[in-house]
Image (cartoon, helix red, strand yellow):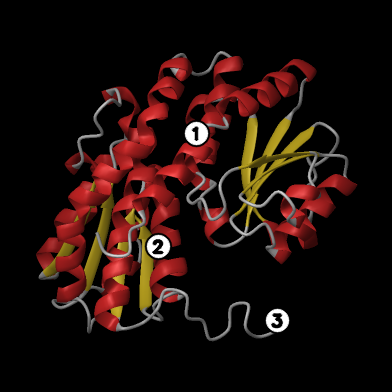
Amino acid sequence: MLGFNEPEFLAQVASAVGLRPQIEEVVDRLVDEGFDSLLLVGAGGTYAQMWPYEHLARRHSTLDVRAAIAAELVVSGDARLGERTVAVFTSVSGTTDDSIRAIEYCKSKGAYTISFTGYPDSPVATKVDQAFVSQPKTWPFDMQMLLFMGRLLARRGEFDGYDQLAGELAGIPEILVEVARQAESKAAAFAEAHKDTGYHFLIGGGNLWGFTYLYSMCILEEMQWLRTTRVHSAEFFHGSLELLEEDTSVIIFQGEDETRPLTDRAEAFARRVSKDVTVFDTRDYPLTGISPEFRGLLAPLVLDTVMSRVSKHLERVRDHSLDLRRYYRVMDY
């Protein structure tokens, strides 16, 4: 597979799911001590990656759980943030300025702070009350967040299948390698067909809306300097559909939760207008060892693996490094 370091990938994913005992111990303590609200704080891609877990809590829990943009949280505040708040942060590098400031802000309000990162000596690890450290550069954080949120909901009596899910996640490193292998040919074909495409229209919903936002903004825009429109499938018929034309590249991310019919509806309309509609559907991947009732929860993780192959092939055909930036962490702002 192009640009795929399998041993490194396996080690990273294994290190993330290997945090299960530590995550459970901390979650159990927090539940026993009691808290009233949970803030899931991120910046850019790590903010978008919190949305599936806010979505999960909204569907299953009466606990106050909210995703927050780190920079906005610091300047706008939150009336419910205080000593009975738990604030969770993620950062690949552990050096994201907005997240560091948000950690300091939350601690100043008395919140208990938790982070997930790959660097134990980084500010995002050392400034929080509890840091969970995986292998360096481990991405995405869905494994850790699913364990954290699953255990929390289970302890609250709001998720009966947690122990089974957590046990099955032990096999996720190998499962995702197989997903990557299966996605390779489609990823290469998509990249070849779109090497000169300068604009993409992305649609996703449910627990894949965060990934839709992330892939549009963090990959296609930031890493490939391509123009995009991104729209939630439930909002597709309220404005953005007017941008579709016959040659518009439409990318649809389809998952397996209860919002699937909304994305189906958007896809059906998009195909009536555009001759260039590509659907990336988690149903296409077997996920051997994962029970059917948990497949929907893993959709963001599966699509991240699939689209990482697309990203690598776009990098190749467009001769545009995924590490190249004009402004991000290049200029002061």
Which mark, by number, is residue 333?
A: 3
Which mark, by number, is residue 215?
A: 2
Rounded to the nearest angstrom, the CA distance separating label 2 from label 3 is 23 Å
Say whether disc 2 or disc 3 marks the residue closer to the N-terminus: 2
Left or right: 63 in relation to 315: right
Element carrying mark 2: helix
Q: Amino acid at mark 1?
A: Val
Q: Is residue 223 above or below residue 136?
A: below
Give me the residue at 28% from left, 73% from top: 314
Is residue 7 or residue 201 the one in the foreground? Answer: 7
Give the class, few, some or many, for how many residues have Cα within 10 Å of label 2's Cα (few <14, many ≥20).
many
Q: Single out the residue that lies furthest toward the front.
A: 7
Left or right: 258 in relation to 104: left
Q: Is residue 265 visible?
A: no
Q: Which residue is mark 1?
A: 17
Res 110 quadrant in image: top right
